[in-house]
Amino acid sequence: MERYEKYARFALGKWSKNVTSFPLPPKKTMYKTYHPSSTKAKAEFELSKYCRIVRNLPEGIEMVLQENDPQLEESRYVANLEMETLQSELEKLTK
């Protein structure tokens, strides 16, 4: 977590000289697993969710760090219409 926060500060420091960040207290959540068809707890454990706030982003910059989402993979690429037209023309010529 600290390494990612350090990376974010370094990356944003290229655009803005005054980047500050601070941690928030972790949010703790208690989880329980149960025996099948029972209300008796099999195991209990507590997970903490950590959060860092980065302030003073340069104007026009929005930064979002999140888990990888395979559905966003398609939106990364911009269609090259000229290339697609040339490929379709090439396919027509080779038929």
Image (cartoon, helix red, strand yellow):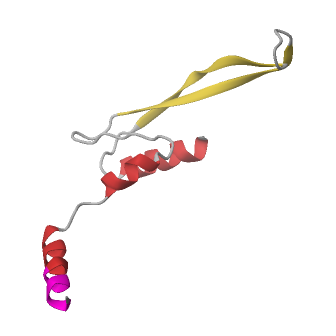
Snapshot quadrant of residue 89: bottom left
Residue depicted at x 81% and y 9%: 39
Residue 93 in magenta stretch: yes
Looking at the image, which residue sits at the far top? 39
Rendering coords of residue 85 (x, y %):
13, 74
Answer with left or right where residue 44 lies relative to residue 11. right
Snapshot quadrant of residue 40: top right
Instruction: Specify start and end residues of the magenta stretch as a single range.
Output: 89-94
Looking at the image, which residue sits at the far bottom? 94
Residue depicted at x 67% and y 18%: 29
Q: Nearer the viewer, residue 49 or 33?
A: 33
Rendering coords of residue 95 (x, y %):
19, 88
SS assignment for the magenta stretch, majority:
helix
Answer with left or right where residue 12 lies relative to residue 41. left
Answer with left or right where residue 55 lies relative to residue 93. right
Q: Nearer the viewer, residue 13 or 74?
A: 74
Residue depicted at x 60% and y 40%: 1
Residue depicted at x 36% and y 41%: 63
40 above or below 81?
A: above
Rendering coords of residue 4 (x, y %):
54, 46
Looking at the image, which residue sits at the far front? 95
Rendering coords of residue 79 (x, y %):
22, 63
Residue 50 in magenta stretch: no
**Number of disc labels:** 0
